[in-house]
Amino acid sequence: FDQEPAVILNSMLPLYLNSQLVSILYDAQASELSSRMTAMKAATDNAGELVKALTSVFNKKRQAGITAEICEISAGASCIDTEMSPLGPDLGLEDNEDSVLPDLLQELEFGSLPEFPPVISDALLASEATEPEMTFENMYGEQMD
């Protein structure tokens, strides 16, 4: 039982074209899903790099803040340190170039300055480690009237 080629061609051609069209549609959808997956992977990788960069910036800013606080604390601690140093008293509130220079020249003229700077002994360093009593006389070197 053979059929004519025209009948076979007329019955097979729509099936062939239909299968080709379905194949093209499946390939297009697979291509779209593949490109979406690639885009999502690239976005995930970029987000990871951004997190690393922002974490690094945050840590640097945080460390800079901590360093600034430590500097402020140490500066404040050195400001309230009222011990007399072996190199002489600190300048007072009224001291300036005009008031200190004549005293320095007088000390140089009469030789009351040591030839070499004094050596700080271990005992002196240990005594500086103890905190002095905070009184007005200790802080300003004079008594209140």
Image (spheres, helix red, strand yellow):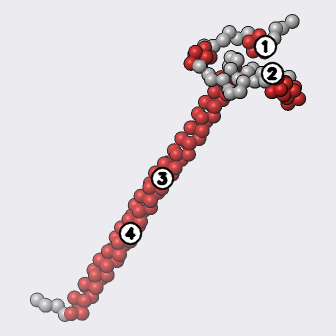
Q: Nearer the viewer, mark 4 or mark 3?
A: 3
Nearest-to-viewer mark from 1 and 4: 1
Judging by the rendered image, the residue that carries numbered circle 3 is 49
**First along the sequence among labels 3 and 2:** 3
Res 141 label: 1
- The CA span between labels 1 and 4 is 87 Å
Occupied quadrant, residue 75: top right
| Marks 1,2: beta carbons within 8 A | yes
Q: CA distance from mark 3 to mark 2?
A: 56 Å
Mark-to-mark CA distance, 4 and 2: 82 Å
Q: How many marks?
A: 4
**Which amino acid type is marked by label 4?**
Ser
Extreme residue toward the top, this view: 145
* Whether residue 20 can be seen here: yes
Residue topped by disc 2: 92
Judged from the image, the secondary structure of the residue bearing numbered disc 1 is loop
* Picture layout, residue 1 above or below residue 21: below
